[in-house]
Amino acid sequence: MGPSRRVLLVITGGIAAYKCLDLIRRLRERGFDVRCVLTEAATHFVTPLSVAALSEHEVASDLFSPTDEARLGHIRLARENDLVVVAPATANILAKMAAGIADDLASTTLLATDRPVLVAPAMNSVMWRSAATQDNLATLVERGVRVVGPADGDLACGDTGPGRMVEPAELLAAVDALLVPDRRLAGRRVLVTSGPTREPVDPVRYLSNYSSGRQGHAIAAAAAAAGADTVLVSGPVDRPDPNGVRSVHVGTAAEMLEACTAELPVDVAVCAAAVADWRVAEIAGGKLSKTEGSPPVLELVENPDILATLATAGARRPNLVIGFAAETSDVVSRATAKRHRKACDWIVANDVSEASGVLGGDHNRVHLVRDNGIEAWPRMTKVEVAGRLVDEIVRALEG
């Protein structure tokens, strides 16, 4: 990957600190020189010895070290690295960073750095959603701090929801994007759709699905990381916009189609959104009230087909149109039929049955269906799926 790059990893006190051991290993495999700072709380979850063994550097933790601080150790840590990564980024460290508090080595180093900073939040869902945390995060983003995650899922406290630190592979991809510029898609325009759509029934109800937007957002981030001018058209999701991506937020399928066609021409369109197939023929002006007897009958009409529209856009058709087929059975055969029916170039097919855990989960197992055959990919994280799909897109455009 060229000359070694130096990463300062600040590990704070959360259960997700154990993931940093794998992250250090992965960073070292990629050729990064990794230095680590542990907060006092972090030492309750990982040991300085294990971190030092993996990074092959002494671990820093004491702001008042008589040897390190005699040489202004926190200033050297802050300046002699190319990137500072905070993982897990607890609510406490985010608050300190936002307020400029410097009461230990980690917070002092973060206040003193002039290098890019990447944070990977990890905390309980209620703490994540709190106004204080969201305000602190907004302040940091406004100052240029990059954010990756958090993910949804089971949390150490027993709750389920947003707050899980992203997996090491996703963190590594974010580091790569910042320190190892990928220009393979430079000069290309990529359009990605993501998330569900919501089709109103009345002012308080809607038809939708369980899509989290995790896969579509990961694809948009991977395309941007490869140098593409990337626009993400997203339905309602509980996920931050990816860094380096221009995001357009929509609600309904009709709004998503309008936003997509407004972006043409593009070189590549990846339709990863789980667009509702139907909408109600007439949205009720007031809330439909529950009455005794039969429930109200909803007349449904078909929504516009965004994938087929882009694939048959004539002179404005993207060079490469990729759809997704989320199926619960006969995945490959249904995806193959869909590719021909929609006139798109590729279909990424996946099993979204309840047992697969794909909808809302961190992992995916897909088949890439093309005119020259079907390629089965192993189970991997959605970030890894996104990276591999971008690799295939690059090869197709270069060919």
Image (cartoon, rainbow, N blue to C red):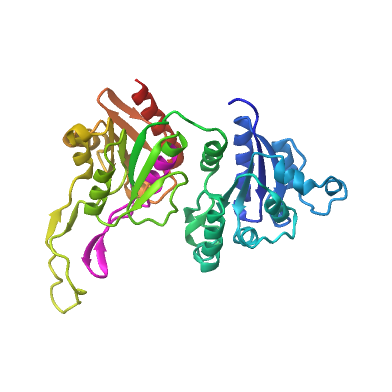
In this picture, residue 174 sits left or right of residue 193: right
Q: Quadrant of residue 270?
A: top left
Residue pictured at 18% horizontal, 57% vertical: 279
Is residue 224 visible to the viewer in this orientation of the structure?
Answer: yes
The residue located at (24%, 36%) in the rendering is 335
Residue 211 position, x and y percent, is: 34, 52
Q: What quarter of the picture does the N terminus occupy?
A: top right
Q: Give the left or right position of residue 39, taking residue 64 as reference.
A: left
Total label count? 0
Residue 258 x/y as whole percent: 23, 49
Instruction: Find the residue positioned furthest to the top.
Output: 399
* Image location (x, y in percent) of residue 365: 38, 38
Does 89 sit left or right of 242 as displayed?
Answer: right
- The x, y position of residue 391, in whole percent, is 41, 29
Q: Nearer the viewer, residue 350 or 217?
A: 217
Above/below status of 323 relative to 148: above
Q: Quadrant of the C terminus?
A: top left
What is the magenta range?
A: 194-222
Which residue sits at x=19%, y=39%? 308
Front residue of this view, candidates 327 and 20: 20
Residue 60 visible at all: no
Q: Nearer the viewer, residue 146 or 356?
A: 146
Q: Is residue 34 magenta?
A: no
Q: Tell me: residue 97, above or below residue 322.
A: below
